[in-house]
Amino acid sequence: MVTRLREFIQSNSMILIGGFALSMFSYTCHADDCGAFVVDLLLGEPVPKDVLLDDLSSVRIIYLGEYHTIERHHKLQTDLLRSLAEGGMQLSLGMEMFSYDQQEILDRWLKGKDDIAGLIKDLGAERWTNLKAYEPVLVLARDLKFPIIALNAPEKLVRKVSRGGLESLSESERKSIPESLEQINPQYDRLLRIRLRVHRAFHDKGLKNVVLAQALRDQTMAGRVVSFLQSPDGKDRSMIVIAGSGHLNYGFGIPERVERHNNYKYRILLASESGELVLSEEEKRQSMPVDITHEDLRFIQRPIADYVYVVPLKDEDKSQETETASAHLE
């Protein structure tokens, strides 16, 4: 799928770009984000920044899908937060990068003046591995006095479900499992199983628990989003949700589970991988080549998002095709 998507963007980027102002976002154009543009997947056309912001400002939840290690994605998040705030939008920021048991630590950081190093130290060993990359958006939200909500389930709990299923949990752990966890959309289940083939260690029997662990993250994050937006602190705010694209693609995962609780108006904006996701040596050892074709995904029959933020591919990206993968669950 990566190869086919790259070929499509390379062959069509000039058609989309021709005669159109591509300076979508206000940060300085770097080598990796020159020529960036946003495509409305329902209109099938690129859209200028003011049109995008007008639409995003009309909804209660803005889902921003990312690959966690791509710097361009973090710049987009910061720019959108700033631009929407400048337009007068009262916002909150929901982040996959923090688990709900870390909310107190996060709140203390928000009330203080420590840099990101102080937050990382306080979070300890269970912190998100590349939290430093989120410093600009975190500091901006703090400066704007926007609440930041820790959305995720504790990593130890997710890991335990992934390895042994719900039956491996203690009685007290079971009490922390959200209701309707096992109500997984069959299309989402099928999509996850297609994408999980990239992992060498996963086999058919073990996939059930891995899918269940993904659902645990999704349901926990959805519940946290709804709880805050219904709370006194959140009832007059919209929320930007920053999460891996795997939790948002096609409206599955978090958006679908939020809708089960409340029909908030929302938009999904994904950022393309565009050849920038480079696997570590350990990730390469744990993965294997998987060819996911357009035809493989036709069963979904809905757009992957409302908008996709894209940069054209460079020729040198071709040499990295065997070292990148979009099949990772983010």
Image (cartoon, rainbow, N blue to C red):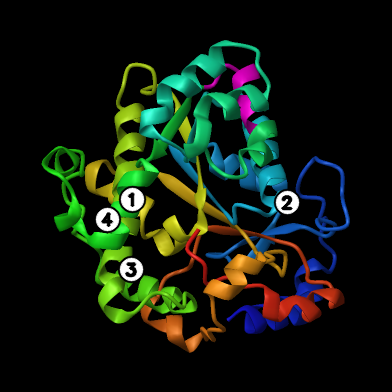
Residue situated in front as seen by the camera: 222 or 182: 182
Which residue has dot 2 on it? Answer: 72
Q: Tell me whether the residue at label 3 lies in contact with that at label 1, contact meaning CB atoms closer than 8 angstroms.
A: no
Which residue has dot 3 on it? Answer: 188
For label 4, the crowd category at 10 Å Cα-Cα, with few meaning under 14, some 14 to 19 and many 20 or more, is many
Helix, strand or loop for the magenta stretch, by majority = helix
- The kind of residue tagged 4 is Val
Q: Quadrant of the N terminus?
A: bottom right
Going 43% across and 83% down the picture, which residue do you hit?
298
Which residue has dot 4 on it? Answer: 161
Going 19% across and 59% down the picture, which residue do you hit?
183
Residue situated in front as seen by the camera: 198 or 238: 198
- The kind of residue tagged 3 is Tyr
Q: Earlier in the sequence, mark 3 or mark 1?
A: 1
Nearer the observer, disc 1 or disc 2? 1
Q: Tell me whether the residue at label 2 lies in contact with that at label 3, contact meaning CB atoms closer than 8 angstroms.
A: no
Percent position (x, y) of residue 132?
67, 37
Q: Earlier in the sequence, mark 1 or mark 2?
A: 2
Up the image or down, 320 lies above or below 76; here it is below
Which residues make up the magenta segment?
Answer: 137-146
Label 3 and label 1: CA atoms lie apart by: 18 Å
Residue 208 colored magenta? no
Label 1 and label 2: CA atoms lie apart by: 28 Å
Label 4 and label 2: CA atoms lie apart by: 32 Å
Label 1 and label 4: CA atoms lie apart by: 5 Å
Which residue has dot 1 on it? Answer: 158
